[in-house]
Amino acid sequence: MTTDLTHVLQMWEDDEASRALGMEATVIEVDHAVVRMVVTAEMVNGHDIAHGGYLFTLADSTFALVCNSRGQVTVAAGADITFITSARRGDVLVAEGWARAAYGRSGLTDVTVTRESDGAVVAEFRGRSRQIR
């Protein structure tokens, strides 16, 4: 399948929230994306571990790349995350997302967040998307 990635690349370039958190997209393909992020001091909570909201944001940014990779403007209709283990200040997190299903204007995307140093699964995210006209 050949799809023009212009739309999703422009969306990523314009994504100030992801950029402000230091996210780096290392792979952007049709139905697949990989995004890296370093857990900074500003991202840890009172337990000195990564705040779950930042883990969700990393997974959500990856989800956005995947569900927009077919060239249609697509937004989140809902998402869930399961936290498996904690991440700490200085950890490099890698989120890898894959499209799992597409039906009509709706889709389902899974994102796994791992710690780069040991490959430990930090979180599992499932996003539901909807193409808008």
Image (cartoon, rainbow, N blue to C red):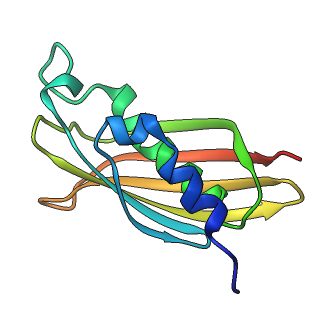
Name the residue at 84% across, 45% down. 132
Image: 112 above or below 45: below
Quarter of the figure with residue 43: top left
Name the residue at 14% across, 18% down. 47
Name the residue at 14% across, 45% down. 91
Count of picture labels: 0
Q: Is residue 10 left or right of residue 103?
A: left
Residue 61 picture location, percent across and down? 49, 45
If the image is split into quadrants, where does the N terminus sit?
bottom right
Decide which of 71, 47 is in the foreground and name it: 71
- Residue lying farthest bottom? 1
Name the residue at 9% across, 41% down. 90
Residue 48 picture location, percent across and down? 12, 22
Q: Is residue 82 visible to the viewer in this orientation of the structure?
A: no
Decide which of 38, 121 is in the foreground and name it: 38
Image: 26 above or below 131: below
Q: Is residue 133 visible to the viewer in this orientation of the structure?
A: yes
Q: Is residue 132 left or right of residue 16?
A: right
Q: Is residue 22 left or right of residue 63?
A: left
Quarter of the figure with residue 96: bottom left
Residue 4 picture location, percent across and down? 68, 75
Residue 82 picture location, percent across and down? 43, 38
